[in-house]
Amino acid sequence: MTDPGEVDSLPEQLRRVHMVGIGGAGMSGLARILLARGGQVSGSDAKNSRGILELRTRGARIQVGHDPSALDQIPGGPSVIVTTHAAIPKTNPELVAARSRGIPILLRPRVLAELMAGHRTLLIAGTHGKTSTTSMAVVALQHCGQDPSFAIGGELNESGTNAHHGHDGVFVAEADESDGSLLEYTPDVVVVTNIDVDHLDFFGTIERYVAVFDDFADRIVDGGTLVVCLDDPGAAALGGRVAARLGDRGVAVLGYGEGVHAGLAPGVHHVAHLLSWSASATGGQARVRFTAPLVDEPSEFTVGLTLPGKHMSLNGIGAIIGCARLGADLAGVISGIGAFGGVHRRFEFRGRCGGVDVIDDYAHHPTEVAAVLTAARDMVTARTDGPATGRAGRVIAVFQPHLYSRTMEFAGEFATALDHADAAVIADVYGAREQPIPGVSGRIIADRMHIPAQFAPDLSRLAAQVAQITRPGDIVLTLGAGDITMQGPEILAALENVMPEDILPGNAARDDAGATEGADESDRPGRVS
């Protein structure tokens, strides 16, 4: 175990930190860890939030709005400024003031890498599934009695936080490839869930995007481990390349899944064979055979998850291998995965009204959208096939495209993915950091779809549009990385206005963003509310 003094101490440069955009998911988590390790933290953000209020209770000094005066909240001023590429422009007045004062400016991944020093690290990479896989690994290790540090892109439902400073000398985190910043890390164990095409606005070409995963694998320590999904061609091919390239450094390359693309991965040890998978109304079950070198003797386990979708079970298997390579007990980890209660905005149950479930998910890439809708379809099918349910529900997708460049690049792919639903309502683009592109809107997706699809450019009317096409037994999914997440309670309220009176009594169930409770907890999708 790592010396606690080595873990708890902070480098001199990180003892007084100012964070621009402190309310963001990644930045707020970093602030929590710095505060827990005794640092002084100030920050600023464009708007107030629950996360900012919580950080203030921990001792952070935070100003709403961006102004050079925010740099003066810590006595003596900050020794370093922390920011992010994605959300904060270089022209931000605090960054301009910091440069004029000669205060170093660091990006979040660089600081997170420094906080990992002295820990054994498990990092989760991949185009999709990072947050869920990282979260499962954290919960599984905690189930085994460990106290890992962690930094996650979403809030764990179990603890209500996205970051924690632990005392076991283990650090679990996401490794975000979107801007190449994962190359700041030097990991012991890496899990790569998949490699798809994304973030071409930064990388320019598919080849450069794929190459960043190879460069990341090259940073694994001697004697470390790379874990890849053999059911994904990109991840499997990465495993094959790394096995050939890093074998002389003692890096073990392990694979999991059914092995659909194992032929692309020579030299990879297929240590977790997915023998079967089945869906249920509240999740899924996988039968897995584990083999050497992960275990001494082959053994079979049933891996249960309260979250639906075969893709989620594959993520869970990847998390299991990663935890086992850190020395955790395999059976204990599998038990912990089964107790995993989900992550904020990852197939998150928002409420039920009139027999309609409303679920929210962060899916904002065609592959993610297709996977989430397939999982919802599995749930609807399991309900319909179950004893005496009497429900022939449908899947209703409510999708908000994220970024104009991504919408323009993948409009056809989004349409194909959304065709996995029975009907869809498409909002306009959430531009985030981008300026509008002429001719690019949610309509270019809706027009390409083969299922009934409505374009809803006005968010204030979207909930009513959704309620009008919904009937008892349906699952409504709000999908996207923008403010579509706020529509869940609005849709539930709209459903109350259109559902027949004989359906409503006793059926309305809201999360804390809505109003009443009352749905049978055992029948809630994934039980992740």
Image: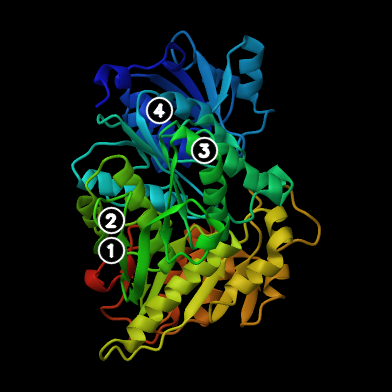
Spatial CA span between label 4 and label 1:
30 Å
Spatial CA span between label 2 and label 3:
30 Å
Q: Which disc number belongs to residue 246?
A: 3
Task: Tell me whether circle 4 and circle 1 mark residues in contact (CB < 8 Å).
Answer: no
- Seen in the image, is 364 located left or right of residue 142? right
Residue at far left of view: 145
Task: Tell me whether circle 2 and circle 4 mark residues in contact (CB < 8 Å).
Answer: no
Spatial CA span between label 1 and label 3:
31 Å
Q: Which disc number belongs to residue 116?
A: 4
What's under tag 1, amino acid-wise? Val
Q: Earlier in the sequence, mark 1 or mark 3?
A: 3
Q: Secondary structure at mark 1?
A: strand
- Residue 494 in sight from this viewpoint: no
Q: Can you identify the residue that label 1 sits on?
A: 303
Q: Earlier in the sequence, mark 4 or mark 3?
A: 4
Spatial CA span between label 4 and label 3:
23 Å
Q: Secondary structure at mark 2?
A: helix
Q: Which disc number belongs to residue 337?
A: 2
Q: Looking at this view, is 165 or 467 the one in front?
A: 165
Q: Secondary structure at mark 4?
A: helix
What's under tag 2, amino acid-wise? Ile
